[in-house]
Image (cartoon, helix red, strand yellow):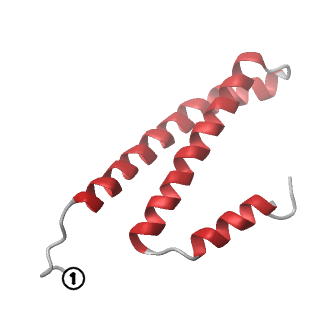
Amino acid sequence: MPSEPSAKQKANKERLSKLSGEEFDKAYMSDMLKDHRTDIAAFEQESDSGKDSDIKEFASQALPTLREHLKQAESVTGKIEQASKTPQDPAQP
C-alpha cells in the first residue's frame, strides 16, 4: 500500500477543493462514476482471468457491491443533473 496519495490524487483533491455547491457535486460524482467503471472493469478482468485463486475469488465477491455502488452513483448523478435543469424559485433560500 502506498504511504501517501499519488500526484494524480493530490491534483484531483486540489481541483475539487476549489469547487463548491453544484459545481463540486457534478465534478465529484463524475469522478465517482469514472472510478467505479474503471474498478468494475479491473475486478471483472481479475475475476475472469486472474491467476491467484484467492484474489480471483475476492474480485468475484466484490463485483456485486461495486455494481450496486455504480447504480447508486448513477442515480445521484441523475438527481443532480435534474436539479440543475429545474428552475429555482427565487423565494426559496
Front in this rendered view, residue 60 or 48: 48
Q: Please provide percent x and percent y for residue 82.
A: 27, 54
Residue positioned 48% across, 68% down in the render: 24
Q: How many numbered marks, from 0 up?
A: 1
Front in this rendered view, residue 89 or 43: 89
The secondary element bearing badge 1 is classed as loop
Residue positioned 54% across, 37% down in the render: 65
Front in this rendered view, residue 86 or 70: 86
Amino acid residing under circle 1: Pro
Q: Please provide percent x and percent y for residue 56.
A: 75, 24
Side of 69 where 49 appears, left or right: right
Front in this rendered view, residue 79 or 72: 79
Q: Please provide percent x and percent y for residue 14.
A: 66, 72
Q: Is residue 53 above or below residue 70?
A: above
Q: Please provide percent x and percent y for residue 45.
A: 71, 24
Residue positioned 15% across, 79% down in the render: 90
Residue positioned 62% across, 69% down in the render: 15
Q: Is residue 82 above or below residue 17?
A: above
Could you tell me which quadrant the C terminus lies in? bottom left
Side of 6 where 92 appears, left or right: left
Q: On the image, numbered disc 1 is attached to which residue?
A: 93
